[in-house]
Amino acid sequence: MSAGRRGGVDRLRRTVRATRAYLRAARPGPPGALPDFLIIGGQRCGTTSLHAYLAGHPDVSAATGKELQFFTLHHERGERWYRAHFPPPAPRRQTFEASPYYLFHPSVPQRVARLLPQARFVALLRDPVERAYSHYLHTLSYGLEPLSFADAIAAEPQRLAEALRDGPDTPAAHHALRNHSYLARGRYAEQLHRWYAHVPAERLHVIRSEDLYADPATVYGDVLRFLGLAAYAPPQFARHTRRRDRTSGELTPDLRAHLTDHFATPNATLATLLSHPHPWWPA
């Protein structure tokens, strides 16, 4: 599928889903439930797979679609619009959504804490070098990145600074933060510190993506215990993604070494924050 067609299909899907939510919100009667938990990110870190595993649990109901983006792009639409994406409350049943932009956007933790004071949150973190390159390929596949990978990461600081001049919630800011934040999104400790300022650490479960890929049954079982859900195993732990990374020579050994050095201090900070001896290591 071409980049233009892929973007058009995604936009149409989001428009249909949002319109249906408006119609449901306009109906009289009680609104849907607020979510019991959120998968908050990060992008290109396995959130689609974890979303699929949790949506298949017999005691869980997923929202009307992945990436509602209520706390980022659509916060002005109001609580009733958000609730319209969820089923009515039901005993012993949890509901959730997954929007990977939530972990990164600076306005989200405070908004979430205000609306969902008892909710739980799951974050997945991937080797930031691999994540950055996967993010680049994802943006490239949508026709939103004209630069090479090396040029894109060199341009990132200026791109973000210019886009954020009027704050993080303008269309320009959202475009840059979502599409051109290749390195910024891999500085995970900064993002977790923002969340911990508004959410108790015991309500935020952090997973290494590499562990989910290597041993999904164990990681999934840990998530279920964190969420207070009964043990359950899906028929298979298939790997789900919106787009497979294609091989490319743009992540050269020299560029990989440069990025590994770039992330050395942020990774050390993250290891201290999570009390983990080393969050990633060279292959």
Image: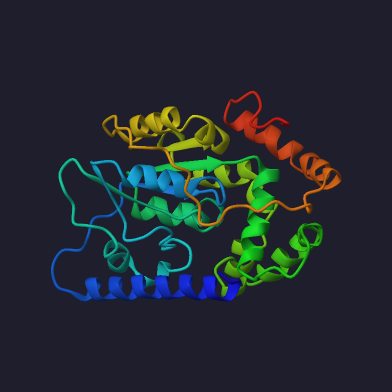
Left or right? Give the position of 102 relative to 181.
left
Instruction: State the residue at coordinates (57%, 67%).
Output: 174
Q: In this view, does 227 lie above or below 10?
A: above
**Which residue does the image show at 48% across and 56% down from the upper left?**
108
Left or right: residue 90 versus residue 163 is left
| Vertical side of 228 occupied by 135: above or below | below
In this view of the protein, which residue sits in the foreground, 240 or 187?
240
x and y percentages locating residue 207 in the rendered image: 51, 35
Residue drawn at the location 32% of the way across and 64% of the way down: 82
Q: Where is residue 24 in the image (x, y as percent from the top left)?
A: 23, 71
Residue 122, percent across and down?
A: 44, 41
Q: Residue furthest right?
A: 254
In this rendering, would 154 be left or right of 120?
right
What number of labels is visible? Answer: 0
Q: Residue at x 41, y 70 (%)?
A: 14
Q: 7 and 178: which one is in front? A: 7
Figure colour scheme:
rainbow
The one nearer the camera, 116 or 7, is: 7
The quadrant where residue 151 appears: bottom right
Does 6 appear above or below 64?
below
Q: In which quarter of the image is residue 203?
A: top left
Q: Can residue 254 be seen in this view?
A: yes
Residue closest to the far top: 277
Split into 4 quadrants, where in the image is the N terminus? bottom right
Answer yes or no: is residue 196 visible.
no
User: Is 168 drawn above or below residue 36 in the view shown?
Assistant: below
* Residue 110 drawn at (x, y percent): 46, 54
Which residue occupies the foreground of this view, 239 or 91? 239
Q: On the rendered structure, is 166 left or right of 120? A: right
Query: Toward which corner of the image does residue 17 lie, by quadrant?
Result: bottom left
Quadrant placement of the C terminus: top right
